Amino acid sequence: MSIYVSPGGRPVSASENQSLANIAFAGKDIRHLAAEGSFHKNCQRTSPTHLECIYWNEVGIVYSSGRVVHVAADATYRVTAVTVSTIRKLFGVSFG
């Protein structure tokens, strides 16, 4: 899941990421987005129909920032919504 850049390659905001992700993943099978043993080690299944992924795009000793992506699906495992928010870490403590 590439969430930091638009198709043109420029960095985008969390709201733009959310819009792009909803377009890209709506209706897809959530079980294939971050399958067990895949390269998406930053994603964790919180239930059979929900994924939570954390992507760090700026990492430092004192300060880090990134995005949290929540992917929700319906009972047929089809993605219904993706939400993206910013996460920050200061001295190892995360905050929104």
Image: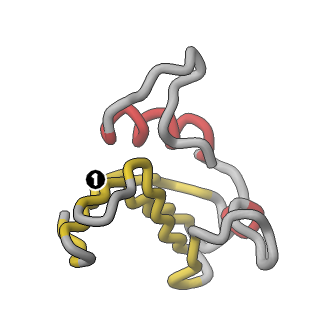
Above or below, comparing residue 5 to residue 33 in the picture: above
Viewer-nearest residue: 20 or 65: 65
Viewer-nearest residue: 25 or 65: 65
Above or below, comparing residue 31 to residue 8 in the picture: below
Viewer-nearest residue: 42 or 28: 42
Image position of 22 (left or right of 48) = left
Single out the residue that lies furthest toward the top.
8
Q: Which residue is mark 1?
A: 86
Which residue is at a point 47% across and 57% down the rendered structure image? 55
Q: Quadrant of residue 64?
A: bottom left
Q: Residues within 10 Å of mark 1 (few under 14, many from 20)?
A: some
Residue 39 at x, y percent in the picture: 75, 64
| Circle 1: element type | strand
Residue 16 at x, y percent in the picture: 37, 32
Image position of 36 (left or right of 66) = right
Residue 47 at x, y percent in the picture: 54, 84
Which residue type carries mark 1? Answer: Thr
Which residue is at a point 22% across and 77% down the rendered structure image? 93
Q: How many marks?
A: 1
Viewer-nearest residue: 17 or 50: 17
Which residue is at a point 68% across and 64% down the rendered structure image? 40
